[in-house]
Image: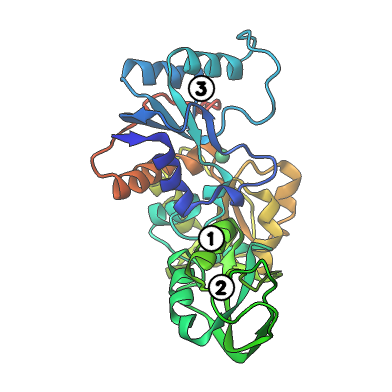
Amino acid sequence: MLRIHEIIACFEAIAPSRLQESYDNSGLIVGDVNREVHRALLCLDSTEAVVDEAIAKGCDIIVAHHPIVFGGLKRFTGGDYVQRAVMKAIKNDIAIYACHTNLDNVLRSGVNERIAKQLGFAVSSVLRPAAALLMKLAVYVPNDHVDAVRDALFAAGAGSIGNYDECAFSTPGLGTFRPNALANPTLGVSGVREMVQEQRVEVLVPIWLKAQVGRAMVAAHPYEEVAHDWIALDNVSSEYGAGVLCKLPKPMSQLDFLQHIKLEMGVDVVKFTRCDVREVNTVAICGGAGSFLIGDAMRAGADAFITSDVKYHEFFDAEEKLLLCDIGHYESEKYTIDLFSDILSSKFPKFATIFAETITNPIDYLT
Ligand SMILES: [Zn+2]
């Protein structure tokens, strides 16, 4: 039997909530983290119709891409679609969990990689890497405990850089300390200066693992007081940020590329700009509203950019140098529920997940 906090931890391991944008409200929106759940309904939007579907299908948790609640709710009178969905979920004891821009902002196993997979493209890098997500931890350790402390830091998630883990740097030095009368020192006696051969062990730590790594450091370190520094870094991340870049296995003509998108993404309409691009080699992708990345896509040398919600004037921003493709918001993200299913079933193979049949796309096309 699974509890909701286990489901949250499963998603957080891939898409830490710290990665969500400031306007977002990813996370548990309705429900108690300690409650047991038996069956999840996976969807893009947890509307009232989806809550009805969850009730009909015996689901006790809805996992949605878009949070049904973005801002604070002041009334619960059923006056709008948000209130109605939330009230119905609470009344029927159905939890709602959303994994939104935090899942957009990861290179691996994120929304954009899922779109790339649908198109048969391999993701190469983040389009706009995020900054200020890393800290450096420097801890001073007596020589005979360096291995134990380093192991503990690695086990807690420190020391990963791209495709490498267990990355650390150590420099030897001389540590000094003098215990006072209240101290309970591992080495030395009160009132006498102690001198110890130590090492300064340095590792990178994502900010969301700071507390966990800090606890592991203290637990593995032999001293009563652990001398250490947390240092904020300005490094950009190779694994986290907005949008992705893909290299195509072989170049495609504009028309072939557009038809490929239409077919593989299962869309009726692809809006695009006229442009000078003859061959598409490099493609930028951002599921959902991605026009804020048009400049990034051009600077990265992308020939095409697949996204949605592009406004009229933003199409001009492509300067006829980028094949800017708007495939629709819902359409660009609809495979996210397959991603939810993959994430949950890889960790909990016996947990029941159902794809919502309710089409929540509020936009229709007369073709
Ligand atoms: Zn979206």
Residue 141 location (% of width, % of height): 56, 80
- Residue furthest left as drawn: 350
- Which circle's residue, 3 or 2, is located before the other in the chain? 3
Front: mark 3 or 2: 2
Residue 223 in percent (x, y) is at 56, 73
Q: CA distance from mark 3 to mark 2?
A: 54 Å
The image quadrant that residue 42 belongs to is: top left
Q: Nearer the viewer, mark 1 or mark 2?
A: 2
User: Is residue 66 visible in this depiction of the protein?
Assistant: yes
Q: Quadrant of ligand 1?
A: top right
The residue lying toward the viewer, choosing from 149 and 18, is: 149
Mark carried by residue 47: 3
Marks 1 and 2 close (CB-CB < 8 Å): no
| Left or right of residue 180, residue 212 in this image | left
Residue type at mark 1 is: Arg
Element at label 1:
helix
1 or 2: tag closer to the N-terminus? 1
Return the residue nearer the eye: 336 or 64.
64
